[in-house]
Image (cartoon, rainbow, N blue to C red):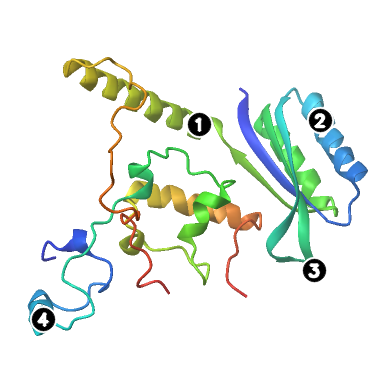
Amino acid sequence: MNGRKSFGGGGGGRGRAGQGQQQGKDGQQRRPMFRRRKVCKFCADKIDDINYKDTRLLMPFVPERAKILPRRISGTCAMHQRKLRTAIMRARQLALIPYTAE
Amino acid sequence: MNRKYELVYVVSPDATDEQVTELHTQVEAIVQRLGGAIEKTENWGRRRLAYEIGRHKEGTYVLEVIDGSGELMKEIDRRFKVTDLIIRHLVVRVDEVQGVIDRTRTKRTDVSRRRRTARGLPADRQPGEGQRGEPDDDRDDRFDMSEDMR
C-alpha cells in the first residue's frame, strides 16, 4: 500500500507510518523502526523439492496451533507457499504433522 | 504409459514384523501382476503419529516407489482401503514433479555457469570460494517469525 510491504512482520500491518514515527521520537519504544527484510527460505536456501516426507523442513511452518504459517509472517514467496501447502496437507494425511494441537 | 508413484502406508502398531513383510509381498504381487515394477522400498519403522487414528498412537510407516499404470495404483488403493491392518495410506504421483525439480536445478546451474564464465571465472565453484570470513551477526535473522505467531 505505502511501499512498506517488504518490512512487514512485527506490527502485522497495524499502525500508520506517521504514528510509528511519533512513537519513535518518544525514545522509549519497544524496538526501533528498523525491521528485518524477510526472504523466502526456499529461494534463499535453493530448496527445490518441498517434500511431504521431510517433516524437519515443514515443522517450522506449522507453529504451536499447527496452523500453516501465513506468507505475511514467514516471507515465503507465492510459488513456494503453494508447494509448502500441498506438502503440509499430504503430511497431515499421513499423521506426520498434526491438523490441530490437542 | 507407465508413471511413477509413491505409496506410503501406515500399518497398525499391533501388526507383527511378519505381517508387515506380508503386506509388502502382497503389494509386490499386485505390481507384478499388473505389469509394474517396484523401484524402492523403505521401512521407516515405528513412529509416533501426530494425532490418534482410531485409538492408535503409533504406526509402522512403509514407503514404496512404484513404476506402473494408474489402474495398478487404483487396485492397490482399493485393496488398502479394505485392509484393516493399514490405518492410513497415500498415493502420490511423482514423475512430473520430479521433472520440474530436475529442470529448475539444471537451469540454475546452467545460469550460474554462464554468468561465471562471462565474468572470467571457472565454470564451477571452487572449494572454499564465496564464503564470508566473519559474519556480522551470528544469528540467522532472515526469518523473523517469532513475533505475530498465533
Q: CA distance from mark 3 to mark 1?
A: 36 Å
* Amino acid identity at mark 2: Glu
Count residues near mark 3 (Cα–Cα under 10 Å), then give few for <14, some for 14-19, many for 20+: few
* Amino acid identity at mark 1: Gln
Residue B55 disc label: 3
Q: Quadrant of residue B139?
A: bottom left
Count residues near mark 4 (Cα–Cα under 10 Å), then give few for <14, some for 14-19, many for 20+: few
Mark 2 sits on what residue? B28
Mark 4 sits on what residue? A19
Mark 1 sits on what residue? B98
- Quadrant containing the N terminus of chain B is top right
- Pick whichever, A85 or B130, lies toward us: B130
Which of label 4 and label 3 is nearer to you?
A: 4
Discs 2, 1: same chain: yes
The image shows residue B23 at horizontal and vertical percentages of 85, 41
Discs 4, 3: same chain: no
In the rendered image of this protein, does residue A92 appear above or below residue B131? Answer: below
